[in-house]
Amino acid sequence: LRALMQRAIEDIQRFCPLDTSICTWAFATMKYRDPAWLQAVVRARCEFADFSPQNMSNFVWGLSTLNFRNDNMVLAVGREAA
């Protein structure tokens, strides 16, 4: 699992919204909290406008389940949801 996580971190800049949301959802489902993944998500500066409602839901659920909070990300997600 650690190798998959590392590969995801290396490739995150090429991820589409589905990739980002599914990886975050999967890690949360497995209760696999790795600060390196969460930091990579923040650094990737996701374009939340490109996320479908389902992608956004999976992504936010995953972050919440992993007890991750980033105020700037919360604000960006909130702007898209409004």
Image (cartoon, rainbow, N blue to C red):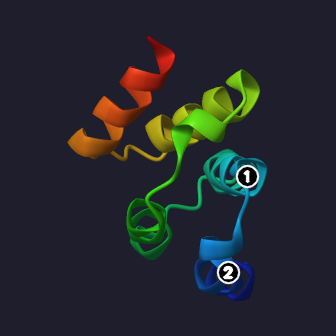
The image quadrant where one finds the N terminus is bottom right
Circle 1 — which element? helix
Dividing the image into 4 quarters, which one contains the C terminus? Answer: top left
Mark number displayed over residue 26: 1
Of 20 and 50, which appears nearest the observer?
Answer: 50
Question: Which quadrant of the view contains residue 15?
Answer: bottom right
Relative horizontal placement of residue 26, taking residue 34 as reference (left or right): right
Marks 1/2: CA distance?
16 Å
Q: Position of residue 36 (x, y in %)?
A: 43, 76
Q: Nearer the viewer, mark 1 or mark 2?
A: 2
Residue type pointed to by label 2: Asp
Which quadrant of the view contains residue 42? Answer: bottom left
- 14 vs 67, left or right, is right
**Vertical arrangement, residue 11 with respect to residue 27, above or below:** below
Report crowding for label 2: few under 14, some 14 to 19, many 20 or more residues within 10 A (C-alpha).
few
25 versus 2 height, above or below:
above
Percent x, y of residue 78: 38, 22
Q: Earlier in the sequence, mark 1 or mark 2?
A: 2
Q: Position of residue 80 (x, y in %)?
A: 47, 24
15 vs 36: above or below: above
Q: In this figure, which residue is indicated by the disc labeled 2? A: 11
Residue 29, position in %: x, y?
69, 45
Q: Amino acid at mark 1?
A: Ala
